[in-house]
Every structure is written in structure tokens, then in C-alpha cells.
Amino acid sequence: MPKFNPFAKLDNPKAVWAWAMYDLANQSFQLVINTLLFGVYLQKVVARSEDDGRRFWSYLVSGSLIVVVVLSPVIGAMVDAKSCKARLLVLSGLAASILTACLALVGKDQLWLAAALYIPAAILVGLGENVLAAFLPDLASPRNMGFVSALGWTMSYVGAIVLQLAVLLGVAVFDWKTPEQWRPLFVFSGVWFALGVIPSMLFLRDRPRGVGADTREWIIAAAFRRLGQTIREAVRYRQLKTFLLVFFVYSLGTQTAVYFAGSIATDFGFSTQELFLMTLLLSLSAGATSVVLAKYQDRWGSVPTLRGVLAVWFVTIGSIAALYYWHAPKAALWIPAAGIGIGFGGIGTASRALVGCFTPPEKSAEFFGLWGMIYKGAGVAGPFIFAWVWSKVGATAALTIMCSFFVLGALLLYLVKEREGIAAVSVSEPMQAA
């Protein structure tokens, strides 16, 4: 019986595998540090009170996201100008992995040490995600963009599932039941991240520079020159511009889910173990969705896929709002939790694939830098709006606002013409250095 190998039918299987392994590796920061452990560790161990820890955690998250928002387009232009995506990806990943492991050094009343380690790590991870996504037009064509994007997303959820099982195993075997005992898990996360960067170091390579590229040009000057040229040529990529606007609207909802899924679950009365199991359910349903989309997304098209995924988001968040309104028992939350996983698994791969189809390879880091800037900007605005409405009106109203982000995004998506956007890239000329 032949072995299943989804990379076998690709022209560049090693490069795509290495790229997908980085998606798997950085889950150690996104899941273990951001979603599961470090925020709780700050509240329970480092800060003098849980309120202080919760507030400081929000400052760390927002501050790092704002820096990524500001740096993303310029870094993207710099990377394209000097054709150094692979180098920046590896260096940012290795530096972030070291900082992640060093989070284990943070102890009682050491909030500023936490900030000094977490903020640069989060910035490096955020910028690294943009650079990683920018490889997509180099590794895939419009014909298989959805398949390659879904492979990366599937690998990331495979990493998430293995990491959660490892955390649960560590908690069970070593009896790490209290946050004070979690420091080895931070070291484990850093090592996991570093090991996942190695394939990128070995197999990912940049596209050759275009003819006429001036390697002596000062890198910052080159970056701003490219940004200026992008603005002047923007009319050629109007479908990308339109989609990035739509992407920001519905990302207000998805980013809110990233940072508040745990709070919603605990508000329903979930214990720590139940929260871990719910996160595992999210990862399993998200991974299964990515596998399905790897097979069918290129056939369906990214825009129709996004419409279907946004419908899932609307039904899921609307159901949770209804559960709040009717004061339903916590057991009722498990089905919508699976819906959130389906939403995450679909929205990421379809959005990234569509940006890849609308992006000329010679401007990939620059355009994906804009994509990352918009996504991180939604991560600042969406949770703030949600938290403010929740505090003023209540959870049901906040979840209704969250639903509206997905409805408005689905409606605005009718403005995006997928074939026109792909055609604009196919006729574009490689950018020449001035």
C-alpha cells in the first residue's frame, strides 16, 4: 500500500516541507506561550495581584502588536529589496526561540524582565510570520496556491496538537499542576521552536534578484523607494487592496476569538483541564478543516471558500451569544468550540492563499508585510472593541458585535474579483531597480 505523502506531487517538496515545518515550529510560541500559559503565569506568579497581571499582559500583547504593525511594511520592502527572506526568517526564528526559553527566568515581581523578554520575542515571531507567508508565491503557482497554503496551516495544527499533548503529559507525569511549576514548559517551547527552524535553514532559498538590482544601495533607502513605487503602481493591484480592506474587517472577529476564547470558556465555568481539552478540540477541528481545504480549495476558489468559512464563523459566534443569553450550561459550549476550530482552520489558509494569488513574487515580502500589518492591527482594534462592549453592555452584546464583523466581511467579499486579481499579477513586469 503506497504511503501518503502530500508533498510528493510538488515540484519542490523539500522547500515546501521546510516552509511548513516553520509553521509547525512557531506554534510553540503562539499556542503554549500566548494562548495557554504565559498570560496565566504572569497573573498567578509574577504580578502582585491577578488584576495587575491581567492588565500587564494586555500591555505586552498590545505593545508588541503595535510595533509589528509599524514595522511590517518597511521590513517587507527591505527584505524584497535585498532578497533576504530566508536569512531573516531563520535569524528571527532562532532569536525568538532563545527568548522564549529565557521566559523561564522570570520570577516573582519581575514584570519588567517579562517585558524585556516577551516583547522582542513577540515582535520577532510576528515579523517572522509575515516573512514566512511571503515565501508562498515563491513556492506555489495560482494553480496550487490553496493546496500549499493549506499544507502549511495543517502542519501548524499538527504542531498545536502535539504541543498540547506534550503539555498535558508534562502536567500529568511531573505533576505540574500550578503555574509556579510551568517554567520547564517555557524551555521546552524554545527548544521546539529552534528545532523547527533547522529545515528552513537547510532548504529554503530566496529567489534570485532581478536584473539590475543594486546590491550596494543602502537597505533603508531601497525599502522606502520600493514602498513609493508600490503606491504609484497601486492601481495595478486594486483587487489586493480591496481584499486587504475586507481582510481587516473580518480579522477584527478572528483576532478577538484568539484572545478571548479562553475567557469565554472560563466564564462558562471551564476548569483548567477542560480549557486544555477545548483548545485540543479547536486544534483537531482546525487541522481537519485545513486537510479538507488542501484537497478542494484550489478547485472551489479562495473567495467562495472564504464565504463558506465566514458563514461558519457567523453561526458559531451567534450560537455562543445565544448560549450566553439563555444562560446555558457549560456542556453546550463544546459544539460551538468545534465550530471555532473549523473557522480558524479555514480562514487562515484561504486568506493567505488569496493574498499569494494577488502578489507578484518580486514584491512578496512587501505585500505580505502589509497583510501582516493589517492582521496585527485588527488584533489591537478587535479585542479592544470587544472588551469595551462587554464591560459596558455585556457578553451577549459583545458577541453580537463580533458576529457583525463576519457578516460585514462576507458582504464586502463580493467586491473582490479573484480572476481579475490573478490576471493583474500574471501580466505584471518584474520590478526593476531604479
Image (cartoon, helix red, strand yellow):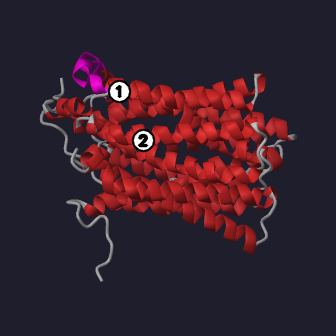
Q: State the residue lying farthest toward the bottom.
A: 1
For the stretch drawn in magenta, what is the main secondary structure? Answer: helix
| Residue 263: percent from left, percent from top | 72, 42
User: Which element is circle 1 on?
Assistant: helix
Q: Is residue 337 above or below residue 172?
A: above
406 and 434: which one is in front? 406
Disc number placed over residue 308 in the picture, else none: 2
The amino acid sitting under disc 1 is: Tyr
Mark 1 lies on residue: 414
173 and 252: which one is in front? 252
Q: Is residue 235 magenta?
A: yes
Answer few, some or many: residues within 10 Å of disc 2's Cα (few below 14, many 20 plus, some between 14 and 19): some
88 and 233: which one is in front? 233
Q: Which residues are magenta?
A: 228-240
Name the side, left or right, on which 155 lies relative to 270: left
> Which residue corresponds to the image point at 19% horizontal and 29% vertical from the top-left?
424
**Residue 14 visible in the picture:** yes
Q: Quadrant of the N terminus?
A: bottom left
Instruction: State which quadrant residue 192 falls in.
Output: bottom right
Instruction: State which quadrant residue 215 falls in.
Output: top left
Q: Quadrant of the C terminus?
A: top left
| Residue 46: percent from left, percent from top | 80, 46
Name the side, left or right, on which 208 lies relative to 349: left
**Residue 193 visible in the picture:** no
> Which residue corresponds to the image point at 26% horizontal and 29% vertical from the top-left?
217
> Which residue corresponds to the image point at 44% horizontal and 34% vertical from the top-left?
372
| Residue 385: percent from left, percent from top | 64, 24
User: Which element is circle 2 on?
Assistant: helix
The amino acid sitting under disc 2 is: Gly
| Residue 310: percent from left, percent from top | 47, 38
